[in-house]
Image: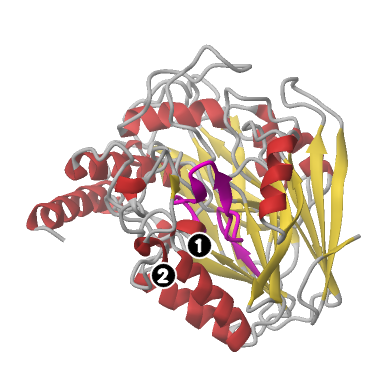
Amino acid sequence: MTLHRRQLLARAAILAGAALTPGAWTSALAQARLPEDPFSLGVASGEPEPDGVVLWTRLAPRPLQPDGGMAPAPVAVRWVVAEDAALSRVAASGETLGVAEAGHSVHVEVAGLRPDRQYWYRFTAGGHASPVGRARTAPAAGADVRSLRLAYGSCQKYEAGFYGAYDHLVADDPDLVLFLGDYIYEQAATAKGVRRHPGPEPTDIAGYRVRYGAYKSDPKLQAAHAAAPWMVIWDDHEVENDYGGDHDRADSDPAWFLARRAAAYQAYYEHMPLRRRSRPVGPQMQLFRSLDWGRLAQLQFLDTRQYRPQRTCAALADGKLIPDCPERTDPARSLLGAAQERWLMDTLAGSEARWNLLAQQYVFNEIRRPTPEGVRYSNDGWSGYAQTRGRILRQWRDARVSNPVALGGDIHCFIAGDLALDGKPVASEFVGGSISSLGAANTELQALAAANPALRFTEGERRGYGLVEITPEGCGVRFRGIDTALQPTSPVRDLARFHVETGRPGMQHA
């Protein structure tokens, strides 16, 4: 790390820490009355624990303005959590402040609730009430839980399609929703697609706030957030396409890019139901973590963008594709970075859960891509950092991790397959398509599967999400695809069903 970069990180940390520290907030009195409804972006919950959950909203009566249409003064925001949808049996309540330094976003960490229960919540501010959202707490540690239903998705480019998939996700009534990256897309508006991105490509906090304002104004996305708690991780488009670590793909000045990354991370935190432990400090943000669901399941969430070294074999790349160069299999190069990789290995070794779900961004299988010039690999995911992938596979096997399953996104396609080590399955993976971003033609995917026999199902022409049902006896996965994302609403159907039996690695078609 150069002195220049250390100085940049230190300055950014001081500025970001000050901006989000209560002692630095303006001393102006909180506004008593707001002329417009500030809850245009809805409400959300997330990060469930046995005794509580995070509640989120952002005050933004005009969400396509950088300040959300809010004056600089802080605003008092009251919140209530109840045991019923009518909010008559109050379980907890309180008051906090929405401040300009944090985009008037609100993150309430509710505690003192009962484990494994549904709750309902609402915010009020300036004489206005938010919609009512539904949250739930996680089961108690070590509880004998009999089922977990979770939905997962990724890649919801606003221009590419509508969010009709969320209508059906809400109807499926999950206990938990996982979002595996590309919540927003940062590119400037194009002439294609069903709707337009507002403004130019964002590079500062004002631009990113406007971009989130457009996405989170979508009523179907708001309904999905209000229906169940979310656990979120990012991929690249929350900052810039194909970035990794301190570098963007254009190899811009690292100081400039780190300033952009700091703005993007700040906006991400402002718009997600995350705990204070994930609050960014300049261009650094703690996002890898785990979630226990009693003794039934543990979910490990990975950050595959922030800590990776510069792109693998960049000088040899044709786009993202590289030959089998020495860097690709260099054991010193980690997609996760040393600290996160150690955390993951320790977490897997210590898990006592019946099922272990790795929530991450990519196809976990190593994908060989035949070309006229020979076999090529992507340098943007696990295939570009083969030793990191191999170490996780070996840890699953050698630590006798119970029933590992990988969930992924990024590729805008549905993919299912087994994950093998030395020719024997140790886990299965299920890549859950995209909410709206366009995928590959099925003819292209069929050719890819022919070159990669571990891929046992592929579908790239439908948009949708994955639905997972976990019991002590097995893990069932359904790929749910809508007919089209080019219309606001669309029917849904099961594209495929799979089953993994406890204690028997490998997936079966159900």
The residue stretch that appears in magenta: 357-382
Disc 1 element = loop
Quadrant placement of the C terminus: bottom right
Q: Residue furthest left?
A: 3
- Separation of residues labelled 1 and 2 (CA atoms): 8 Å
Work out which quarter of the rendered image holds the N terminus and state it. Answer: bottom left
Question: What residue is shown at x 53% (from left), y 50% (from top)?
Answer: 273
Q: Where is residue 226, by image quadrant? A: top right
The residue sitting at 57% across, 38% down in the picture is 124
> 236 or 277, which is in the foreground?
236
Residue indicated by mark 2: 340
Sequence-first tag of 1 and 2: 1
In front here: 55 or 417? 417
Residue 361 falls inside the magenta stretch: yes
- The residue to which callout 1 is attached is 302
| Amino acid type, callout 1 | Leu
Q: Which residue type does callout 2 highlight?
A: Gln
Residue 160, image x and y in percent?
Answer: 61, 25
Cβ–Cβ under 8 Å for marks 1 and 2: yes
Helix, strand or loop under label 2: helix
